[in-house]
């Protein structure tokens, strides 16, 4: 039997078993910086989220951030993009989980509220949105990805659901759901019980069911999102 060839690095030298490539180390550092940024935003707010604090939270050297993100706005952009991607992944899991439910609209809205609108992630996202009001660089960096997220959400909504009336747009109704849930998630910190918002969720489901219905027989995934800078 022929012995398999040893893996080689970009320079042509064999890699030691278990040794990570430079690209893998860079990706690991990048991931740690983004995760640390999200934790700092949720805990300390935008004003308290400094590059120094992020690097310390990530357990990295002080020069690590500059090698991956030239400015704080660039790092916040990556953090915001990760939040949008994560929300879309959670939304996709919610869709796949309700494909055969008797009332798919109710099941989807319930799963979206429980799975997508994590209070800590929403806190971090809102801090970035508020910061973009006074940070032109951050605002311009966020715009393309925000538009791509809206388009991905629209295509998913149109794929699975249809209006019951000619004057109703499914995408608009799903966006209203998103904005409603975002506001509800912000107020969860004041709730005395996690179930305190259930009556409002049930009310919204009843209102939505008058205007939107699931497309019969559609259980396959929606079109793949087209994110900026991703081939």
Image (cartoon, grey):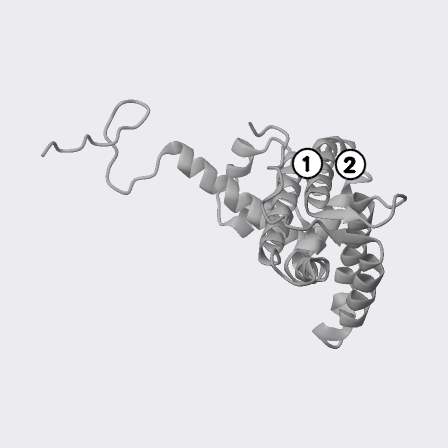
- Horizontal and vertical percent for residue 199? 80, 71
* Residue 43 seen by the camera: no
- Horizontal and vertical percent for residue 73? 68, 36
Q: Relative to the observer, which residue lies in front, 158 or 189? A: 158
**Tags 2 and 1 in contact by the CB under 8 Å rule?**
yes
Q: Secondary structure under badge 2?
A: loop
Report the side of 128 relative to 231 (left or right).
right
- Count neighbours of disc 2 (C-alpha within 10 A) and say few if under 14, some if 14 to 19, many if 20 or more: few
- Horizontal and vertical percent for residue 219? 60, 49
Specify the farthest residue to the right.
167
Q: Specify the label residue 134 is tagged with.
A: none
- Horizontal and vertical percent for residue 197? 77, 70
Q: In the rendered view, tell whether residue 13 sits above or below residue 47.
A: above
Specify the farthest residue to the top.
11
Q: In the rendered view, tell whether residue 205 sits above or below residue 72.
A: below
Report the side of 14 relative to 228 (left or right).
left
Q: CA distance from mark 2 to mark 1?
A: 8 Å
Specify the farthest residue to the bottom.
192
Q: At x 83% / y 50%, what residue is drawn?
A: 164
Q: Quadrant of the C terminus?
A: top right
Q: Relative to the observer, which residue lies in front, 104 or 88? A: 104
On the image, numbered disc 1 is attached to which residue? 73
On the image, numbered disc 2 is attached to which residue? 135
Specify the farthest residue to the left.
1
Q: Relative to the observer, which residue lies in front, 166 or 77? A: 166
Q: Quadrant of residue 191?
A: bottom right
Q: At x 67% / y 48%, what residue is drawn?
A: 49
Q: Secondary structure under badge 1?
A: helix
Q: Quadrant of the N terminus?
A: top left
- Count neighbours of disc 1 (C-alpha within 10 A) and say few if under 14, some if 14 to 19, many if 20 or more: many
């Amino acid at each position: 039997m022929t012995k398999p060839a040893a893996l080689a690095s970009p320079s042509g030298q064999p890699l030691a078993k278990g040794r990570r490539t430079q690209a893998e180390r860079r990706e690991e550092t990048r991931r740690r910086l983004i995760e640390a940024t999200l934790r700092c935003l949720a805990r300390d707010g935008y004003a308290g989220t400094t590059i120094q604090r992020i690097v310390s939270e990530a357990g990295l050297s002080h020069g690590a951030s500059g090698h991956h993100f030239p400015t704080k706005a660039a790092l916040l952009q990556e953090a915001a993009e990760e939040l949008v991607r994560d929300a879309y992944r959670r939304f996709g899991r919610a869709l796949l989980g309700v494909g055969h439910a008797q009332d798919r609209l109710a099941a989807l809205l319930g799963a979206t509220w429980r799975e997508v609108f994590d209070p800590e992630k929403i806190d971090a996202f809102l801090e970035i949105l508020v910061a973009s009001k006074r940070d032109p660089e951050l605002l311009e960096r966020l715009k393309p990805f925000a538009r791509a997220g809206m388009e991905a959400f629209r295509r998913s909504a149109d794929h699975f659901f249809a209006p019951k009336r000619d004057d109703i747009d499914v995408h608009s109704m799903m966006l209203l759901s998103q904005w409603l849930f975002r506001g509800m998630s912000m107020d969860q910190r004041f709730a005395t019980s996690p179930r305190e918002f259930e009556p409002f969720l049930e009310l919204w489901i009843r209102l939505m069911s008058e205007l939107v219905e699931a497309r019969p027989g559609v259980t396959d995934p929606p079109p793949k999102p087209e994110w900026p800078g991703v081939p």
